[in-house]
Amino acid sequence: MNMQKKQSFFKCPYKFLYAFILHTIICICNHEEKYIEDSPLDKLFLDMGHRMAKNKIHDKFAKLKTKTVTPKKENKFKMSMLNMSVTVLCIAIATWFSYRGYLETRVNTPYDVNKLVTASGLDVPDRYWGTYRSGIYFGLKTRDPHSLVTGLMWYFPHLLRQDRSGLRHWCEQNDRLDRYAWMEHDGRNFGVQEIVDNSAILTTTFVKRPGGKHGGDWTARISVTSEDKIRDGEEISLLFYTAIEENVKGWIKANLGDEKQLTGVEGNTQSLGSFIINLNMIHGTVEEHSFLAAVAPGLNVLKETVLHNLRIAFHKGSTKEYIVLAGDQIPLSIDGKKRDANFIATQITGKIPFEIEISYESGSFINRVDKLTGQNYDRALKTHRKLFDEKFEKVFKLKSKGYVEEEIEFAKMVLSNMIGSIGYFYGSSQVQSQYTKGPVPYWKAPLYTAVPSRSFFPRGFLWDEGFHGLLISAWDLEIELDIINHWFDLMNVEGWIPREMILGQEALAKVPEEFVTQVNTNANPPTFFLTLHFILKHKQEEVLEKHFQFFDNLYPRLQTWFNWFNTTQTGDIPSTYRWRGRDGTTNKELNPKTLTSGLDDYPRASHPNIDERHVDLRCWIAFAAHIIHQIGEMLNQPNNKYYETYQYLSDNSLLNKLHWSPNTQTYADFGLHTDKVLLRKVTPPPKSHAQPSETVRIVMEDPTLKYVDSSFGYVSLFPFILQIINPDSPQLGKVLQDLTNPDLLWTKHGLRSLAKISPFYMKYNTEHDAPYWRGAIWMNLNYLTVRATHYYSNIDGPYKEEAKKIYQNLRKNLIQNVFKQYKKTGYVWENYGDVHGEPKGSHPFTGWTSLVLLLMAEIY
């Protein structure tokens, strides 16, 4: 057995047990002294350091040879050896299966039975109800694992097509709305949203009122107007519904008034107790009113349930057709009894403008002085809006910085849409490890988290959430700490946190199958250390006064998370690191993606192998060690190993030795690489009628081990953006010089992700995968760059003034372009073009693009 095979053998201990079982079987089959003669398996045991045990066996049998053994005694001896061998075999088999089972279950075994989230649901009454259904235009639910939910759908009757498209419910880019966003939302008490659908303006507002034992009351209003009154008099149908998830213990039923029109819904659930939901017309003309009571297969198909139950009806004495809901459609159970409805919707078709009001009243709120309706609602909403404005200016100080009202309204929108998009999910992820035969379920758990995009990514992403936390913690620290607790409760016993959390029917419905399973060798940038650094810098007084216990509880998990990174993502030589998850065998990608880095198709070494070293990951580990050390100091639990790790990884001479390219004088990855690659369709043989096969990668020259320095971009900046470069380092001067080079990253709209001179600039990665991190301008890395220039412009060093100049210009360019494109398109976008600053990607993207507000406020 050669050395390479020996190493792989020891890395998989169960292989040793397997070999031992085979060896024992051979012993049983022979059960004579000759079974210990040198066989291939015997040599295997010798190689593995079991010489001593074998020698003892040889000695024992040598002694036996010197004795005269009668046939009868020999048979007894053989039987004794057989029994012993069977016993050893049974123990070995049991040990093997036990160990194998242990390895299989580690991927879905929680880190600790003591959860960080100790207060949720009704324990936090002011955040019990909320707009926690991130992927729909408007709806309320509770922070319970299984909740009563409410929501809004709408359509224009004359525009509802035969394929039933035109019904709005999910946030969909294909709906092509002019714009939609929460304009004001405090995360606790109220929200104001504006939805513009082809000049028809739907304004959704809600206000909550505490009281009773089950989360209090709330009221929502939905008004429809039109821009410049151009759609006044046109019909629109609003559908407001109530539904309960499959595992909710309780019931709902429709309350019908005159002519069997639905006036409201009443119900009772274990979490909410008894409640009633009333619907009232505030003003306007109602053309038609209908309802639906049905059994929906799941929350992910509510829209389909409505479409299946639309009918055409006529009013008496009129030939005009109306699209109506089908009424009571509750099916019978097997025993002939009527089942309980789990979905009740009411439809009001009216002429623009009109407004409806939905009020939810808790049965346990017995000392209610007045209803949260009519003028009482108007006054409550006005009060909350005033408090919101006052807090917004106190936190961000935009008026005092000279911003005009239009810019401040934009800033309120990016904050509110992030806060209003926070979701509450419950379910089980699908995970996999090298020891499982296939995907296995994670444990069922809740997740309270912001989302990158309501339309395209309405679920939790690990590395996005660290950026979201910067803005959320600036606004409401308690909300952010709760989010962090939920994420770290998803850590398994290994210290791994899945990078994408897809929990529940609604979240799963928006995810392609190939992205559902999360693999436990795959990391994601540990951006929560950015959030924690931000909190320690800006909120330390509040932390010490109110949230010291939070950090005390979190600290062991931070250590475990760091240790997972520091053991599973290491490189082949000391102090180097390598993202796992790249495909070294594919011939379909121009440059194999590194999804785990968060930068997806950003060019890395063309031929992934163990020689790779990634400069961005090394900087993340250094940064994380520094923050853990700071938290330990604050908790009076100093641990020098984290400080020493930080010092070691931030040693500029070692960093430069491993990642500074002498050729380009830039920081770079290292690996087996060639730039001479291209995508090409394989040409079929002559006279062949075969269709051209799919596009594959053609390698024009053999790759060699070298710096990947032909692709300067965001990855090259990590020693700078995570502030690891010394302020007097000549490398800092070169980075600042390169930042302002228009042939590299500088544009008048922000920094592009990849230099124009890179051979991969704006290149497709496969036949259908458009460039993603290959030139576009992304706010998250631009924010970190602005933050770094601010840092270096406020610390003594030879490049202080240059950093200050770049800070001012880059910050201005980013703010101006994001605001300009918002005014032009009605949205904040995922990324922006590097030539014209045009919007690209998904929208609305009020995830990390909302960091533009922190740029405006100069909070870093």
Image (spheres, grey):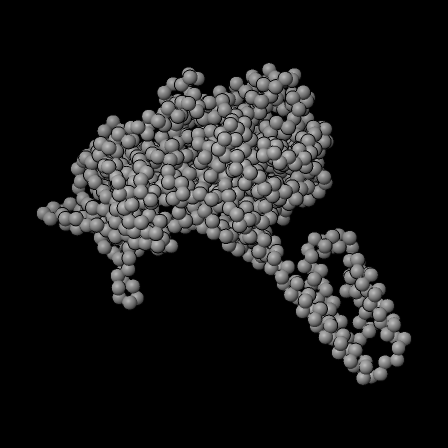
Give the quarter of the figure containing the N terminus.
bottom right
Residue in the foreground of this view, choosing between 605 and 572: 572
Q: Is residue 679 left or right of residue 163?
A: right
Query: Does the rendering let one see residue 161?
Result: no
**In the depicted structure, whether residue 615 falls above or below residue 123:** above
Residue in the foreground of this view, choosing between 823 and 58: 58
Residue in the foreground of this view, choosing between 512 and 771: 512
Image spot of residue 203 (x, y percent): 29, 34
Q: Is residue 775 left or right of residue 325?
A: right
Q: Is residue 843 left or right of residue 321?
A: right
Image spot of residue 582 (x, y percent): 61, 44
Residue at the image position 70 percent from the left and 53 percent from the top: 11
Image spot of residue 292 (x, y percent): 25, 51
Image spot of residue 73 (x, y percent): 81, 81
Residue at the image position 35 percent from the left and 39 percent from the top: 137
Q: Can you tell which quarter of the image residue 449 is in?
A: top left
**In the depicted structure, whether residue 637 falls above or below residue 815:** below
